[in-house]
Amino acid sequence: MSSDQELYGRRGRVVTDMDAKDITRVEELAYDLKIQEVMTRDLVVASPTMKMREMLELLRNRRISGAPVLAGDKLVGILSLEDLVRAMSANDLDADVDKYMAKVLITVNGYESLVRALETFTRFKVGRLPVTDEHGKLIGMITKGDITRGILLAIQKDYQEEEVRRYRASHLFEDIVSDRTTIVMRYNIKKDNFLLGGNASSNIKRALVRLGATPQIARRCGIAIYEAEMNLIIHTTHGGRIKVEIEPQQIIMTASDDGPGIENVDLAVQPGYSTATNEVREMGFGAGMGLFNIKRIVDRMELTSTLGQGTRLRMIIFLERNESLGEATADQTSQGESAE
Amino acid sequence: MNLQTIMDELGLTCLTQGRNFTTITPTSGYASDLLSCVMAGAKSDGLWVTLQAHLNIIAIAALLELSAIIITENAQVEPAVVQKANEQGVTLLATPLSTFEVVGKLWALGLRAD
Amino acid sequence: MKLTDITRLVEGNLLTSDSNLDWEIRGACGADLMSDVLAAIQPDAILLTGLCNPQVVRTAQMADVRAIIFVRGKRPSQETIQLAEQENIPLISSAYGMFELCGRLYQAGLPSLEVNLDCEE
């Protein structure tokens, strides 16, 4: 399992030496994963007394581009396609493998992290490395293709874990039996923390997707709560709080703060009306569209404010039967306002 | 290409006082909603495309002597903004199209960034 | 249009690693006001913007924007790039300005992916 095509990732991108030095997103995995977790164990092995012609057949039949050379138990060299090419151009295919194989052996240990292998690839400009155990015994081979595949599999596993989380969460409402089940999430939002703005909204959107919300519902909730979160960051005296109440048939999101309050609530909802500073505008916010956006995107919006005391913004999205979270019973469909 | 041709081709509505737009020839185009970028990047006699309808856009257009501002997506323009534009001799044009589409059409008509 | 084709058209540099450039982009939107993006953009668009703070990525995440192009060679902070990688949103930087990029992409057949919001309603 180490043909030339293996040097290409699933998406056709070649992992070059440059990339090997420069990888960022996969860096974590490159440190976490061990060489022995991704290396090829099923080895095609050559011997020093094999003829280069046999080697050509071997590589061709097994569709690989190189093989370690073992004398008995001992690793004595490595033979790659380039060595074969050299022999072919010298019209010397009847020579022994011993004559053309690389004898200066660079190896890596199986228990080292992938980063170690990447560094070695870069440093010695090689494409494959024999992997040994702590006693120096050959246990496998590693190529850049193995690393790419290993990391892709790990990413895929992350993805599957997310799927499992989603599966579990989406059955929450079915698994818990009550007359009215509500999941409540609370977030504290700090004033002026522009860099972290959207973290709460991001978590809320993710939770909704896990709970089985449709992409459309998750998007509507995400957009509305994000506008509200940015409002708390930009306009309040001390920041504020977000509360999200999730039920099978409705999602209620509340953003509240303790000041300064809105002087004219009707005016605040008008598109284009804004009290934001130029600084905030230059950061892409404060164009006076936030509340207008929210009003458009949610099913019901209630904005109450007392100057000097604070503001409460309540946003409700109703879920149609085909959008509902979990298998809602008829009892839960009665959205009793009195329960508030 | 003069401003009247552009207005006809794109179906732009003029919000400010009419004038002989055939004598105005925008020499370049600029698109941004960030006023500091426009200050730094737009060239005089240029055409500015934005969805900002804030009062501050008039001062910038007057300062940079832009040939006109195209306000996209039917962004609501307050009467005070139109009044200020008239005072400063700034031409405001409006369209329901998005910035992307307006610029695409201007580009197709041959207008470039510089 | 595939993200690879767009990257080529805008002569852009990919800033995020491990990004999927095979994604199909349905259209584009050029804006620097995030509320406008949140209000008007349709899912699966590419966003062209002159802003480069983390909020652009957050906005993209909320509005299901597929990828972001930063105009005028702007480069976001490392934190922004990490956030984008975490949320799987490819970031591309192009040396050209918004006007040039909108022009090129529109010319290449990429439609506008903003709904018309009538503020008067």
Image (spheres, coloured by chain):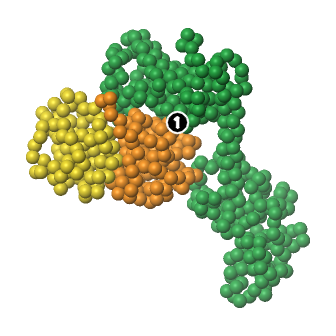
Q: Position of residue B25 (x, y in %)?
A: 16, 52
Compared across the picture, whether A195 is left or right of B64 comes to: right
Which chain has been coloured orange in this picture? C
Front residue of A117/A314: it is A314
Q: Residues within 10 Å of mark 1 (few under 14, many from 20)?
A: some
Label 1 sits on a secondary structure element that is helix
Which chain has been coloured green in this picture? A
Q: Quadrant of the N terminus of chain A?
A: bottom right
Q: Colour of chain B?
A: yellow
Compared across the picture, whether A279 is left or right of B69 comes to: right
Task: Say if A7 sits above or below B104 in the image.
Answer: below
The structure residue drawn at horizontal position 68% and vertical position 82%, both measured from the top left corner, is A86
Q: Position of residue C78 (x, y in %)?
A: 51, 44
Residue type, mark 1 in image? Gln
Count of numbered circles on the image: 1
Chain letter, disc 1 residue? A
Q: Position of residue A166 (x, y in %)?
A: 66, 36
Q: Residue furthest bottom?
A: A91
Compared across the picture, whether A193 is left or right of A249 comes to: left
Front residue of A239/A250: it is A250
**Which residue corresponds to mark 1?**
A216
The structure residue drawn at horizontal position 28% and vertical position 32%, both measured from the top left corner, is B76
The structure residue drawn at horizontal position 77% and vertical position 82%, both measured from the top left corner, is A52
Q: Quadrant of the C terminus of chain A?
A: top right
Q: Is residue C49 visible?
A: no
Q: Position of residue A196 (x, y in %)?
A: 51, 32
Front residue of B105/C52: it is B105
Q: Is residue A175 visible?
A: yes
The structure residue drawn at horizontal position 56% and vertical position 24%, both measured from the top left corner, is A250
